Structure formats: structure tokens, C-alpha cells
Amino acid sequence: MTTLRVAVAQIPNRVGDLRGNTERIGAAMDWAEHDVEADVLVFPELALTGYGLGDLVLHREFVDDAADALSKLAIRSGRVTTVVSTVERVPPVRWADSRERDVAISAALLCGGEIRGRYIKSLLPFYDVFDEGRHFVPGTQPDALWRIGDVVAGVVICEDMWSADGPPEAQSAAGARVLLVPNASPFHRGKAEGRLATTRAVAVRNGLPVVYVNCVGGQDDLVFDGGSIVVDAQGRLLHRGREFAADRFWLDLEVAPPRVVGRSVTNVHTRPTMRPSPLALEPPREPMGEVEAVWHAITTGLRDFVEHNGFEGVALGLSAGIDSSVAAALAVDAVGAENVFAVAMPSPDTAAAETEDARRLAENLGISFEVIPVQMQAAAEDVPLAVRRRHPEISPLERERHYARARGAVLGAAFGERGYLVLATGNKSEISIGAASLAGDLLGDFAPLKDCPKTLVYELAGYRQERSPVFPPGVLRRPATTQRLGPEHLPDYEILDDIVRRHVEHGEDLSDIVAAGHDPDVALYVLHRFAAAERTRRYAPPGVKVTSRAFGQDSRLPISNAWRTHPRPL
């Protein structure tokens, strides 16, 4: 039996922070060298530069700085083979269109003070939130192999592993006995289960253990949840890293039996890796439940957005509706109660019980709270006379929109120029049909609930309430503004959310949704509202992605669009 002592460093994802990332990588290299005495140390994808670079890679100076940082890390390397992913300059290639690209995503193998080799990522995703095909050159050696002591290892990067006939199969066929996989895999609900299933399938299909290393932390609207996993050649889970937290761990991993090597192998080093008595493994930790994972994803994304952009704290309007109440609780877990400021802004139409519930919630959460009333004349009477003559009636819905603008002005004046992040509290259900602006819940700089359907918002409230009952009863049973003032045809949220989920996340249209049991008229009404709401969705600030398809990078519909898959409702 041959074992490889594998160390994993699940480090935070910090885009552009070359100095900080170098320090974190260097500290983990020292740990693996001196404390663990590892054979190999693996970091996540783009650990040196951060993942989610966008057009940063078009700046030559940034790519050159990354190369300098890698050279310094190589000098620091010792006996341990260290797999560090970064970007690097390559000869220009025109591969997907007419534009040449000269940057690639690579995994550098460092050992003995040198860069001993590089693997270039072969499969570049260009779907959902990914646009690597826009920037990078694909690798041309998917079957590259590396000799680490007496073990022939394969190295692939993230997307390379998700194809059933990709680089893992090429490396296994060429003679690899273990697969090392740096990843930057963003979170969405249910992703951890799918990730484990894919890793197990790769291990079983190729008959070799897989070390899957993910990063952790928020990057704008993406959150990386960590949860790095190691499975053996039979697909059995050996270890799971911490979720939503930095982590280091190591294990003695039994590699596959020797195979015929069908291509040349790059020697990283040839020192023996046999360990006579590998240490026993503890049982792998259980994964978080789905709602708990969503809560941690949102708090991680919000915390890192505040920290990375230098905000002093978080502010929000607190109406004692379910959305603003859950947003306030999330903010407390993200940045601490002492850094959260809430303002109730009752209008003359606001019931006193709502303001009192907001006050009680603020006290339960331990956050700063003030009441600043808003008046109708601050917004409605500024409407030009010609418009008022043509449209003399002010509906309850229009009144609420006027108050919403007044509340937004209060938050902007009080916090926007003073270094605080103002939270928008809109949810996915209302954003999807263009109703999110009814209560001013698109006004802000970051929307923690942007990808949470209303039904999930209530699940999040239930999860938080189980920890300690912070929400007053009125918060949990108060009708939503959209239901109270919105169109009479709007269905209950359970129905609305299922229609939106099917349409957005699974690409289902009217016939599919009706076949699933929904009323044709209701489905037609929702789809029509959805198609007309793209302009409103564009107003929304960034927010944490928690479903398989969010509004933002995932969804790129034209605003001006006359085509429909269904007739307009009467």
C-alpha cells in the first residue's frame, strides 16, 4: 500500500489581494512543511489572485505582479510539493473567436525553491456566472502527469473535473494514481450534494482517490462555501473541510495501485513517499442543512462585502415586515450588532403596531434604532401640475411608492455619504415580477435577500427564531406589502415561487408549468409579469447568489424584448 500525505489549505478568496494571498499561502506552506511533514499541499483555484477576476486579467501589470508573487513563493518552497493556482502569461492564441488571448489559469507545482511545472486549465466555462472563455486560453495537455516521490499524480482545475470525458479520464488512462483538484466553486442551495456526487463519480469511474479543494468567502454576489472533500478510489468520503470558514487539514491518503504510464511524466521530486503506518482518519463531519447553509452564505457574502469595500457598518430601513426583519438579523450575524443601524420611517398610513414591532426587534437584536417619520408632501406634491391633471387619482400603491422614495432619501442622507452600507431588502419573488420597488426595497447598495424567494425568507426566519426568538409575533404574521397593495391577480407566494423557480432555474415555459399542476391563467399572468420586469430587475444592487440561477451574472435578458413564448393575458 502506498500512501501520500496530503495537506489541504482552504483559504479565503480575496480578489486582487496579491500581498495578502501570498502571506496566507506562505503561512500554509510553513505549516505543511514543518508541522505536518506533508508530501503535497493543495490550494484552491486562483488562490494567489482570487477568483472572479473579470477584466482585471486584461491589465498586463496585474498579470505581471501575479508572476512576481509566484516566483517569491517558489523560492520559499521546500521539501513539500505545493500546488498553487494563479494566472500566467502564455503565447497568444485565437481559439473561440477573432480575438487573441494570452492569459491562462494554471496550477503551478512548487518544490525545492523552484517552479517545477505548470498545468493549464483545459475546460473554460462560459455559462451561468462564469465567463472564463472571455479572458483565458485553454490548456492543450489534459493528460499531463507529475511524479511526486514514487506516486504519479494528476492535477486538474475545477471545470476540468465536471465533464464525463475530460482531463481526469485522460490522466487516469495515462497512469495517474491520485487526482489533485483546485477549485473555486460558488455556493447555491444543494450545491454541496452535487459537488460530492460528481467527485465520487470521478473517483469510481477512474479508480483513483480525488482531493477536491474549494475556496471560501464572498466576492460581490458570489459566495464560496469551502467544504473541501477527499474521497477514496471507491468514492467513499474520507474528509470534509469546514463550510463557510477557512480551514487546514491533512490525511494519509492511499493512492491507486501502480499503472502503466502511457506518456512522459514531469518529475517534481523522486524522494520516496512510503509511510509504514498511516494515521487513522476521524469520521467526516456532516454537512450543514440547506437553510442553515443559505444563512451562512448570506452572512459570509455580506460580511466580506463590507470588509473588502471598507464600509463602517450597515444601515437599513426597518419596517417590521418579514424582509427587513430577516435582513436585520442577517446583518447582525454578519458584522455584529454594534455595527448595524436601523431606522423606522413610518408614514401617516403606517400602523403604530408596526413601528412598535420594529422597536422590539431592534432591542432583541441589540442594534441601534431610530424613528424618522416620512410625509406625503415630501414626494407626491412635487409631481408636475400637467401630470396631476392627467392623472388626478393617487392610488394606495402610488402612495406607497411615494413614501418609498422618501424613505430612500432619508437612508441616503443619513448613511450613504458617511461610509455605511445601505441594505436593500427586496426578495427574489417580488424582484422577479417587478414588484420589489413597492416598499422601497430596491433602494440600497447591497441586497442580501436578492436571490431568496419569499418562501425561503420565511424559512430563514424560522431558522433564526429557533436559535433564539428575536422576531416579535407580528413580524411573522404580517401580510406582505405586495399582497396587501399589489394586483388582485397575484397568487400566494407558494404558487408564485414555484412558477418562478421552474421558469428561471429550470427553463420551463407555460406548457411545462401547467403540466406540473398550475392554473393556466395564473401561470400566464406570472410569466407575463416576469417578462415585463427585466428593467426593474436591472435596478437591483448586487446580492448573494443562493439558488442555481440568480438575477445578475446568471441572467442576461434584453430589456427591450417583444418576443414571448406565450400569448399576453387578457
Image (cartoon, grey):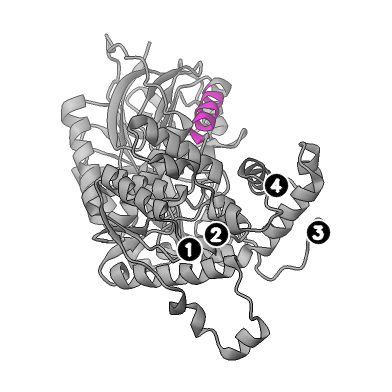
- Between the residue at mark 1 and the residue at mark 4, the CA separation in whole angstroms equals 40 Å
Circle nearer the N terminus (1, 4): 1
Circle nearer the N terminus (4, 2): 2
The residue indicated by pointer 1 is 349
The residue indicated by pointer 2 is 436
**Mark 4: few/some/many CA within 10 Å (<14, 14-19, 20+):** few
Based on the displayed image, in which of its 4 quarters is residue 278 positioned? top left
**Mark 3: few/some/many CA within 10 Å (<14, 14-19, 20+):** few
Q: In this view, does 495 lie to the left or right of 255?
A: right
Depth check: give the residue in front, 117 or 35. 35
| Residue type indicated by callout 3 | Pro
The residue indicated by pointer 3 is 569
Residue 521 horizontal/vertical position (percent): 80, 50
Depth check: give the residue in front, 135 or 141. 135
Badge number at residue 519: none
Give the residue furthest to the left: 34
Is the magenta region chiefly helix, strand or loop?
Answer: helix
- Between the residue at mark 1 and the residue at mark 3, the CA separation in whole angstroms equals 33 Å
| Residue type indicated by callout 2 | Ala
The residue indicated by pointer 4 is 507
Circle nearer the N terminus (4, 3): 4
Q: Is residue 488 left or right of residue 138?
A: right
Circle nearer the N terminus (1, 3): 1
The residue sitting at 48% across, 18% down in the picture is 233
Residue 163 horizontal/vertical position (percent): 60, 37
| Residue type indicated by callout 4 | Gly
Part of the protein shown in magenta: 191-203
Based on the displayed image, in which of its 4 quarters is residue 567 positioned? bottom right
From the image, which quarter does the N terminus lie in? top left
Residue 220 horizontal/vertical position (percent): 41, 55
Asked if marks 4 and 3 touch (Cβ < 8 Å), the reply is: no
